[in-house]
Every structure is written in C-alpha cells, then in structure tokens.
Amino acid sequence: MSSKTIAENRKARFNYFIDEDFEAGIMLLGTEVKSLRAGGANIQESYASFENDGLYLVNAHIAEYDYGNRFNHDPRRPRKLLMHKKELARLHAQLQRAGKTLVPLSLYFNERGKVKVKLGLASGKKKHDKRETQKDRDWGREKQRLLKNG
C-alpha cells in the first residue's frame, strides 16, 4: 500500500521559496478522518504556527462528514501537529529568523494509513521572482514543443 495524497497546495511553490521539507502527524477527530477518506480537504490558504503549547495547522478546511450528525467537527478549527521535540525546537529557531514561514505542501495518508502533513519552511517570493518562475515554466513548455515537433 503506497501513500495517497488527499490535498495538495500547488500555489505554495509559486508563492514561496521552499528551503526544507518536514513531515508531521496531525491530531484529528473521527469525523475528520472519515471526511478525508472521502476526499474533502483544502489546504490552499492554510499555514502552520507555534501557539503556547505546540505547532498548529491553522485555516485548513476539512469538510464536515455527511453522516456525522451532531458530533461533526468545525471545518476550520486549528489542528495540532505532532513532531519530535528536537525537531520542533529546531523549527522554532529557524522560524524566528525574518521572513520565514511554515506552509503545508500536501496532506496524505502514509503506508500505515495515518494522516500526515508535509510542511515546507519557506520564504516569500517577490513579484519579480514570480515572473521569473513563470518565464522559466513557459520556456520549458516551449522547449518541449520544439523538441517534439522538430
């Protein structure tokens, strides 16, 4: 059994320079896991931040489970991320530097069926950096067309 991607933040690599990747577990309720198995998640506008007692995934949308009745969860509640203490301390030190943020790159089920979040330690791109990325992407497509037709 391989890992199954639930949601992906495709805009993250366009808006940020990703310096390093981290994997974290996530604390979920039963209805959230069932909703994720049905494919109801969006992490486009979400981010990770340190609160008083740990690292949290903020503003991630996990749709309400259709059959969850009154025990359903709040779709945009902050969810605690699980990492080793040493990793958290190192990450916290890196985030103290100016211009760094933690952006979720993808949400997936690992081989054991556990929900994991792939986080990227990122620094924001300026407008000219985004234009350069777009130019490189367009040139790569054009080059592929030329090689295919020529």
Image: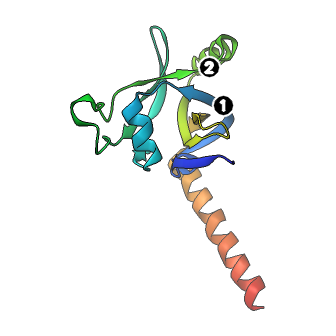
Front residue of this view, candidates 30 and 75: 30
Mark 1, Cα crowd under 10 Å, few <14 / some 14-19 / many 20+, is some
- The answer to whether one can see residue 18 in this image is yes
The quarter of the picture where residue 36 lies is: top left
Residue under label 2: 83
Three-letter code for the amino acid on which mark 1 is drawn: Phe
Disc 1 or 2, which lies upstream in sequence? 1
Residue 43 shows in this picture: no
Quadrant containing the C terminus is bottom right
Q: Identify the residue at horizontal 68%, vertical 15% (top origin).
A: 90
Q: Is residue 121 left or right of residue 48?
A: right
Mark 2: give few (<14), some (14-19) or many (20+) Cα within 10 Å: some
Task: Give residue 11's position: percent from left, percent from top.
Answer: 51, 51
The outermost residue toward the bottom is 150
In space, the residues marked 1 and 2 are separated at their CA atoms by: 9 Å
Secondary structure found at label 2? loop
Q: Position of residue 117 (x, y in %)?
A: 57, 35
Pointer 1: what residue? 22
What mark, if any, has residue 149 been given in the picture? none
Q: Could you tell whether 92 is left or right of 38 in the image?
A: right
Question: What's the residue at 58%, 27% (across, down)?
Answer: 25
Q: Quadrant of residue 146?
A: bottom right
Mark 1 secondary-structure assignment: strand
Question: Mark 2 and mark 1 in contact (Cβ < 8 Å)?
Answer: yes
Q: Is residue 136 above or below residue 127?
A: below
Q: What percent of the width, then of the height, locates residue 113?
A: 60, 38
